[in-house]
Each structure stands twice: as C-alpha cells, then as structure tokens.
Image: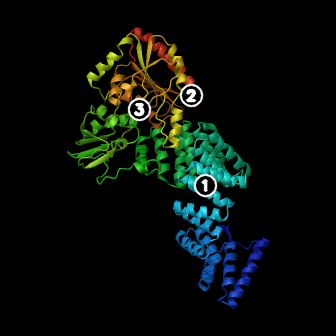
Amino acid sequence: MTKSANHRSHNNSADPQIDQLLEAASQCRALVGENPEDAQSWYVLGLIEAQLGHIDVALASLKKSLDIRPHEPDVLCNYAVILFDQKQHDEASAAFQLALKLDPSNAEAYYHYGNVLYEQDKLNEAMKAYQKTLALMPDHLFALNNLGSVYKKFNNLDSSIACFKKALDLNPDFVLSLNNIGLAYTATAQFDEAMRSFNRALQQSPQDAEVMNNMAVALRLCGRFKESSQWYRRALSLRPDYAEAWNNYGNILKDLGEADEAITCYRKAIQLKDTSDKRHNLAIALLTAGQFEEGWLAYEHRWKTKQMEFCVRHFDKPQWKGEAGDGKTLLIHAEQGLGDNIQFCRYVPQVAARGYRILLELPTSLVELLSSLKGVDRIIEKGQAIPAFDVHCPMLSLPFAMQTRINSIPSSVPYLSVDSHKIENWKGKLAEVASNLKVGLVWHGNPRLHSLDSAAADQRRSMAPELLLPLMEIEGVHFYSLQLESSSRPQGLYVTDFMNSCKDFADTAAFISNLDLVISVDTSVAHLAGALGKSVWLLNRFDSCWRWLQGRNDSPWYPTLRQFRQPQPGDWSSVIRSVKGELEQLSLNRVAGSSLVPSDSTK
C-alpha cells in the first residue's frame, strides 16, 4: 500500500522517471480503452496519475476500478489515502472502514485510518487504530510516533514519551519523534532534555523551521530570552510565512521589552493566519505599550483563546458596553486572578454613577473586602444563585466599556477600606515593635500549575527567599510575612508570620493597614496594598506584566506604588541591592518623620 502521496505534476519535465510514468499511464489508458471493464488497469492508472499529481484523474480512475470490483481492500486503501490527502476526511474514513472489514489484518490500513481519525479530532478512535497497527506490526515507526502524539493530546505525557522513545530506539535519527519528544519534554518542564532532542533533530534536518520554533519556545519558557529570539529569527528566515513563529517571536520581543516590535510581529501573524490567541497576544502588547484604545478592544478576544474559552459565562443577557443604565441591574462578575479583581473593581463606583444597580459576584476570599466598595448594591458569593439582571460585564472588560485611556485611569486611592475594629485588633498584634519601621514581604506567587506558560511566568516573577537576606541587615526595620501560602524560609530570614490568622483578604487588608510599607513581587498582595493607598514597592521581573507598562518605575493604576525592575532577565540581586539602599534611607528618614508615599517617579 502506498503512503500518503507525494504528488507532483510533470509539466513537460525531462526527468526520466516522469517519462516512464507518462509511458505507463499511456499504456494503461490503451488497455482500458480496449477493455473498459479491466479493473486492474484502472487501478494501476489511478496510482500512476496520483504519482504524476493528476489527483482528479487518479480518483476517477480508482473509483472506476471500485465500480467494477468494489471489494478490493488494496484499491480501497489507496483510494482512501488520496481522499485523505485532499482533506476529504469523511469519504476517506468510509473507504478505510470498508477496506478493514474486508481485510482486518492490514496494519497499514489501520495506520492511515488512524491518521484520518486524528485529523477529525476523534482521538479515542485514532488511539485504537494506532494500537491495532502496532499489535499487527510492533515496529511501525510512524504509528508509534502518532500514538505518542495522541497521548500528548490527552496530556498522558509519560505514555507519550514512552512511545517516542520506542520509535527512537528503532531509528535514533527519526526527526518526527525527536521533535515530538522535545515537545513532550517541554510540556513537562524538562527543558534541558527538550533542547537536547531539538538539537538532535536539527542535526538531521538543519533547515527545519518547525524544530527551530519549538527550540525557541523551550528557551523562552526557561527564561533564555535572547537565545530564543535568535532561533525565531532563524526559523522565519527559512519560512517567512510561518504564522506561529511570527506569533511566538512577538511573545519573546514583548518579554524583551520591545512591545512596538512585538505588535508588528503579531499583526504579521494575524495576517497570515488569524486566530483569537494571536489577537489576544496583540492586545497584551498594545496594553503594554499604553495603546489602550485598540488594546482593550483586542483584549475581548481573550474569551476565545485556548486558555480562557472554558471560563466563558453563558448568560442570556447581553454584555454591557458602556451604555447608560436608567435604573437597570448590571451583574459584574469576577474573572482570572484575585489581584486582577482587586485592580479592576475600582470601576464599580463610576459604573454605578451611570445609573446602574450593581450586583457584584466574587470568590469567597474577596467578599468581605469588597463589601467596602462604593456603588455596590449586592455582593453574591460565587456559586450562589444570581438574582435577575439586565446586562452583565466581566471584571476585566470594565476598562473597555469605560473607554479607558492612560490619562483617564480611575487612580484615586484608597478605593477599598477595612473595618476599623479589625485594624485595631491587628494593631495590638504589632504593638511590640511600634518604634520600628514595619514592612511586609511577599516573595512568591501562586504556582499556577494549570498552564505551562503561566507556571513558567510564575517562576520568573517569584524569587528565592534567600535573596531577601541582605534586607535583614537594615537596622530599625521589622519584617512581616504576607505570603498567602505557606513557604519554607531560610535561616536568617527574620520575619514575623501572622498569616495563619488571615482567613481572607479583609484580614490581610487589616494587617497591611498597620504596616508602613509592603515590598512584594507581582502578586495580589501588591494590588491589595495599592488599593488601600498603602506604600508598596513592587519587585518586578524583567518580562513585566502588561499592566505595569514599559519604562516606568511608577504606576498610573496605583499612585503609592513604586517599581523596582530587573535590569536583566532573572537578575533579582540588582533589585534587592536597590531596595536595600532605599529601605536604609527610609529607615533613617522615619526618624525625621518623612512620608513613606513615593514622590512623582520617573516615567
């Protein structure tokens, strides 16, 4: 049986092989001319025409053979392979099913049938077809490779890697499996193994742009941005129409702080192959660059991305786009991370002022804290029944509906407050160090293991607690842990930990209200401190989140926030040196009664 055809047209070529095929085709046409019922000659003619690239003629010839002798498994299989190549998947599937009914021992037919099922996204059936192939032919290289790909789709990465390893035992230079095992290693964060596999693939296929793209992805995920950028450029020099590589190159340029160049790449990627994921990436770059008008509109594509499509809320009411309320009820519902909702709930008073009765749906940990928010008529804990409403709006669509621009961000703080009794209770806990500067510390965020990209970003935004040790040398400062999750601490990191007493963000807010300063990596606690109007120093990774913009050490979202950015990817030591110097000065200034709120920062 032939494999998926590598069809070509002769175009009067002087190639001797082409001449031989043309002569053979002529002979077959003569035979069927003499005997139109000669099924074998029609079959051979179909195969030859397929080799010559005359697909319509090939299919017609094979169909003629099957009309005469409809129960020939080999003819059916070759007919099905060509149909599959032409993306006529339903017709190919039917032909393979009949062929396998006639000859259930045909391993190649099961293999190609598996390919059809895979393309139809019938992964369970494809898996069974590949397994049947391997039961009949255990050393079928392509079936092993493709079964590994199915397992990867199912996120069964151990089985996936095992299949690719078996294929590579049979042929260590098999580029398909070298590339695929590299992808599987990438998905399990085994980046060194992934890059070794991609390098081996490139030794065999040095001009393979897809492998170069995958190498660049692995390098980006482990924070090697400049090397990643070089591989993307190499891939695109070979394949200028490679849409995914343009998209991924945009990602790395954004990470490198080159948002304008990233925007150009995303536009190119969209031009080549438009998807919501690419438009979402474009939105992030536009927002990073402060181009809010186009950015917020493009950000609405997030609901169709692979990462967020499962989060879409299917209401029978329309989404609010900024129109006046006239007494209608608007449901505003939380989305994404806790910090996102703390940041964007600031819009609620403005929305209420447009004439809406506001229902606010929140996760449990935010319910008490956001009850202090002006303009809210009722808070619903997520999971409870939602009363009747007229329109709805996801929390992070509020700036789009309000047509927010850089100069119109509602930045008055505090916009959240805390019960005075809670504040007094925490004041008593902290009373023993009243003479010292009281500083809260956060050094890591939520691991976000649901997404490889998000988990890698968390690794970059978080820091090892050992890096904070130089701060312990500063006199006149008492440090408190504000970590929401338990975390082991190195010897010498002297921090008081009351976080077991914080049952939700309202408790954490009351705690923070008694501090002089919060020093935090990019987590929800930084947003909380900013929303409370508390002085907060943000320890920011090099590939900063879009909301912190480019080239700034302040934030238009939080007037009391100051950024300390990594000068190079992964360089926390420089950040801590800068923080230590500023904190030493702040401790000295405390004696003179200076304010902790930062003055206007360089923009």
Q: Is residue 365 above or below residue 120?
A: above
Viewer-nearest residue: 121 or 272: 121
For the residues labelled 1 and 2, the Cα–Cα distance comes to 41 Å
Residue type indicated by callout 1: Gly
Viewer-nearest residue: 91 or 243: 91
Q: Is residue 573 visible?
A: yes
For the residues labelled 1 and 3, the Cα–Cα distance comes to 39 Å
N-terminal of the pair, mark 1 or mark 3, is: 1
Residue 148: mark in rendering: 1
- Horizontal and vertical percent position of residue 399: 36, 41
Q: Secondary structure at mark 2?
A: loop
Instruction: Identify which residue is drawn at 54% across, 19% down.
Output: 577
- Horizontal and vertical percent position of residue 27: 74, 84
Instruction: Identify which residue is drawn at 64% across, 71% down.
Output: 105
- Horizontal and vertical percent position of residue 202: 70, 49
Residue 524: mark in rendering: 3
In the image, farthest residue toward the right: 16
Mark 1 near mark 2, Cβ–Cβ under 8 Å? no
Q: Nearer the viewer, mark 1 or mark 2?
A: 1
Q: Is residue 324 visible?
A: no
On the rendered structure, is 319 left or right of 556? Answer: left
Which residue is labeled 2 in the image?
567
Residue type indicated by callout 2: Pro
* Residue 568 quadrant: top right
Instruction: Identify which residue is drawn at 35% across, 50% down.
Output: 313
